[in-house]
């Protein structure tokens, strides 16, 4: 059935009879007919009341679609068949991925009308660009504000708006000064000679603008102060951050719910939580510190989107779902919401962002948008070290992606008058390492190519060869090198890290692989507890025995901490009883408590990591691959290479040595950063030999729960370190999948690979063979080995009839799964 609607456009005179003093609230026939978004914005500022139709139009049209161009407002109002005015999307961006959802009523004739209008309007169309109209309206509004401001100033009211050079004050008659002429006020009246009058000088800031201060300067800074800290590793940034939070809570009486801390990794969140917990146990702060909003970027963005889904879903694309959205997609969506709904951060009084040097692309855009919409009285503290900015490779091939350097300079530009501080003393290192890292950092930020290369030569001359042979490494040799302390083995690529992990496994050397900061797998106790839970609702008294029965070795204290972690995902924690489905949904939308997530073993004595993942870590001793310290061919003064080298030499507390690895070329996919390797066959054709597995989307987690039998196999056979193989499945569907089987029994199928692994394989072979065409099914390897179970995890999603092995609660499902890692080895000689 076709429902007719008619336009709300009509021709009316703009001349209105006035019989009394103008009053905007009485000009209803004019103001209540307005729909233009910028005019509505001005009316909102003037306090003009809106009709219901205008309220709806303002919600839609005064903000732009997350997927539309910045100057495009694709919403408009029509009168439907019932005579009601409604707002509809009239977007014509047919290439948008959400176009079919937003425009189910689209008719191709609309494009023809649009093209006809373009032809007929010609040059006049240029004057109708919204950016131009907006500029005109803003300028007109500014002039109106100036007039209002002058009138307020004469009346003794405070104002901080820009004033015109000359304005005639209003005449105020009084018995004493009835005949006095109006007074002319001019900003030109400067008693000094013209040559002595001050000139407007634009304040310029940069990496030379940072002033060295003591930590107390930042700790005791006012809650409304705005500060950017740029300081090296070991200078006490994290300690100072903790002390500042403690001061805000204990001395400034700040509401912990009004303080937000954003971190890159869950490990950083855990450090902050643990230190604040210790402070509360010592009586330094109250236990209300738990209300402090400490999150990763992904957690914050997921929270914002979830809030919008519940409170103002009209700001999201139609039928929007959080499931299936990767980290970057969530961050971009949250940024768009912050542009639309600029009062989201209105209740915060201080924002702290850690490791700002890692802000690249959508994360940089997110933080800049947050800073722009903070209340004027809300302070912020940004901490980082521009010398450790290692993620600018993402912007190398795409100038539209904001690099960390661009982020810093945008802060310099938009906030020239904030505090720019640094800490100089390195508390981590002494001796030769200290004497190298301090000047190296200065030269990387503000030095010359010659000075940077001179220090590089000194580094190479100082670092000693460990003489350790990775191919024949022994536990005794490693223990002797680390001398009872912690050891970090640092590589350039994650492929190298996975290779070294394989060698250490074969030598029975316990170790941990450093995970990516973005990983967010749920701990297994959640599935252990809930998969056998019989009821739809739960409280702590019911949760505790279920937790203890399904998690052997756990204590009542563990159960209490686990319950608090579950309840922390809810927006109303004061309830005593919850629907289990609510808790499961909360895990997806608002999970942030460290007890919920798998993390790198904090007690690991040996950790293998690539340089990027090692940032923020420190070890007693470090073994670093020679190719990290040695300048790469053609990169004698690549600043990015200097930063990689700088991070490597600042990780150890007392001992740094290099280690050789058999020369090999490892490719890196430019998008996913997946590592892979190739070799030559007897016919001199290249073929894929190894590929990294374990990235997001590599495993289709829903296949862990296709049946109760598969869940039983996971329970019976899978634990951390279990060796796995991948077996190619018959072609059936849009992408190629592999069965995940036990290495010792290929008949035990545990699940299948996902679409991300398929695309990773395809791009790897396209890169190796230098071709852009699709890769035929027969060229995909049949078997891959050297894959390990990393962690047992909990999986949660919306209920699905295909999840026969999952436990269902209402509209949500939960089951047990696992994560994997490895530099998967192709086990055949040829395709």
Image (spheres, helix red, strand yellow):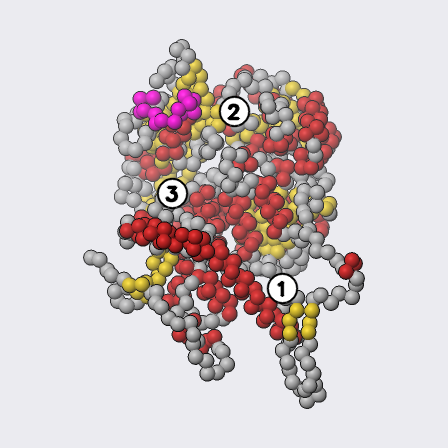
Dot 2: element: helix
Name the residue at the left extreme: 1
Name the residue at the bottom extreme: 175
Give yes or no for contact between labels 2 and 1 (Cβ–Cβ under 8 Å): no
Residue of label 2: 496
Question: What residue span does the magenta drawing correspond to?
Answer: 765-779
Q: Which mark is residue 324?
A: 3
Residue of label 1: 162
Q: Nearer the viewer, mark 2 or mark 1?
A: 1
Q: CA distance from mark 3 to mark 1?
A: 48 Å
Q: Indicate the position of residue 268 as horizontal and vertical percent values.
A: 56, 43
Closer to the chain start, of discs 3 and 1, is: 1
Which quadrant would residue 655 be assigned to in this image?
Answer: top right
How many numbered circles are shown? 3
Can see residue 646? Answer: yes
Closer to the chain start, of discs 2 and 1, is: 1
Q: On the rendered image, what quadrant is the N terminus found in?
A: bottom left
Q: Residues within 10 Å of mark 1 (few under 14, many from 20)?
A: few
Closer to the chain start, of discs 2 and 3, is: 3
Which quadrant would residue 348 be assigned to in this image?
Answer: bottom right
Give yes or no for contact between labels 2 and 3 (Cβ–Cβ under 8 Å): no
Dot 1: element: loop
Q: Residues within 10 Å of mark 3 (few under 14, many from 20)?
A: few
Q: Nearer the viewer, residue 33 or 592?
A: 33
């Amino acid at each position: 059935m076709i429902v007719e609607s008619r336009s709300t456009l009509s021709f009316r005179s703009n001349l209105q009879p006035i019989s009394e003093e103008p009053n905007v609230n009485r000009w209803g026939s004019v103001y209540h007919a307005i729909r233009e978004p910028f005019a509505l914005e001005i009316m909102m500022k003037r306090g003009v009341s809106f009709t219901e139709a205008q309220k709806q139009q303002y919600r839609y049209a005064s903000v732009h679609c997350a997927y539309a161009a910045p100057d495009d407002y694709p919403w408009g109002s029509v009168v439907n068949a019932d005579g009601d005015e409604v707002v509809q999307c009239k977007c014509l961006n047919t290439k948008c991925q959400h176009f079919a959802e937003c425009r189910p009523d689209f008719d191709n004739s609309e494009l023809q009308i649009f093209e006809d209008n373009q032809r007929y309007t010609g040059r006049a169309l240029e004057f109708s660009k919204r950016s131009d109209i907006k500029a005109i309206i803003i300028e007109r509004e500014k002039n109106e504000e100036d007039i209002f401001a002058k009138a307020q100033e004469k009346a003794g009211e405070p104002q901080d708006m820009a004033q015109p050079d000359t304005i005639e004050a209003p005449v105020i008659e009084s018995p004493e000064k009835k005949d006095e002429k109006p007074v002319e006020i001019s900003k030109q009246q400067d008693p000094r000679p013209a040559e002595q009058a001050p000139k407007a000088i634009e304040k310029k800031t940069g990496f030379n603008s940072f002033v060295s201060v003591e930590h107390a300067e930042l700790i005791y800074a006012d809650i409304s102060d705005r500060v950017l800290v740029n300081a090296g590793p070991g200078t006490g940034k994290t300690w100072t951050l903790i002390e500042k939070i403690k001061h805000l809570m204990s001395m400034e009486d700040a509401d912990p719910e009004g303080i937000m801390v954003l971190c890159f990794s869950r490990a950083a969140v855990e450090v902050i939580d643990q230190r604040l917990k210790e402070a509360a146990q010592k009586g330094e702060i109250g236990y209300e510190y738990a209300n402090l909003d400490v999150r990763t970027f992904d957690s914050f963005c997921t929270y914002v989107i979830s809030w919008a889904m519940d409170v103002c879903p009209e700001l999201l694309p139609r039928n929007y779902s959080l499931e299936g959205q990767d980290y970057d997609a969530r961050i971009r969506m949250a940024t768009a919401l912050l542009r639309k709904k600029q009062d989201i951060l209105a209740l915060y009084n201080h924002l702290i962002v850690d490791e700002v040097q890692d802000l690249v692309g959508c994360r940089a855009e997110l933080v800049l948008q947050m800073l722009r919409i903070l209340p004027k009285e809300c302070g912020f503290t940004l901490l980082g070290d521009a010398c450790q900015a290692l993620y600018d490779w993402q912007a190398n091939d795409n100038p539209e992606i904001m690099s960390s350097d661009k982020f810093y300079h945008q802060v310099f530009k938009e906030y020239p008058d904030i505090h720019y501080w640094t800490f100089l003393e390195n508390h981590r290192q002494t001796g030769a390492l200290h004497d190298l890292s301090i000047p190296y950092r200065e030269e990387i930020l503000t030095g010359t190519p010659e000075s940077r290369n001179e220090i590089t030569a000194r580094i190479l001359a100082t670092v000693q060869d460990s003489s350790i042979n990775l191919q024949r490494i022994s536990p005794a040799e490693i223990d002797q090198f680390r001398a009872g302390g912690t050891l970090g083995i640092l590589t350039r690529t994650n492929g190298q890290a996975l290779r070294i992990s394989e060698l250490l496994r074969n030598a029975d050397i316990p170790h941990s692989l450093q995970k990516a900061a973005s990983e967010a797998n749920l701990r297994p106790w959640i599935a252990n507890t809930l998969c056998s839970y019989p009821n739809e609702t739960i409280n702590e008294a019911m949760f505790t025995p279920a937790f203890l029965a399904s998690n052997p070795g756990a204590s009542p204290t563990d159960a209490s901490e686990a319950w608090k972690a579950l309840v922390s995902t809810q927006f109303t924690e004061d309830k005593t009883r919850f629907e289990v489905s609510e808790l499961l949904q909360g895990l997806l939308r608002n999970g942030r408590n460290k007890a919920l997530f798998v993390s790198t073993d904090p007690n690991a004595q040996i950790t293998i990591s690539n340089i990027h993942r090692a940032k923020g870590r420190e070890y007693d001793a470090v073994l670093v691959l020679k190719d990290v310290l040695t300048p790469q061919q053609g990169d004698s003064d690549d600043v990015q290479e200097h930063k990689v080298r700088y991070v490597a030499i600042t990780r150890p507390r007392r001992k740094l040595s290099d280690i050789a690895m058999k020369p090999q070329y490892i490719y890196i996919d430019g998008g996913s950063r997946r590592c892979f390797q190739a070799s030559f066959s007897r016919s001199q054709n290249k073929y894929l030999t190894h590929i990294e597995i374990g990235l997001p989307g590599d495993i289709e987690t829903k296949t862990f729960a296709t049946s109760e039998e598969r869940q039983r196999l996971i329970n019976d056979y899978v634990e951390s370190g279990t060796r796995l193989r991948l077996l190619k499945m018959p072609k059936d569907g849009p992408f190629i999948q592999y069965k995940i089987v036990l290495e010792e029994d290929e008949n035990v199928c545990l699940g299948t690979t996902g679409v991300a692994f398929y695309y990773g394989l395809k791009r790897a072979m396209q890169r190796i063979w230098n071709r852009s065409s699709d890769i035929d099914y027969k060229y995909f390897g049949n078997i891959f080995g050297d894959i390990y179970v990393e962690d047992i995890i909990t999986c949660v999603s919306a209920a699905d009839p295909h999840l026969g092995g999952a436990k269902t609660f209402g509209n949500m499902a939960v089951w047990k799964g696992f994560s994997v890692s490895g530099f998967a080895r192709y086990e055949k000689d040829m395709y």
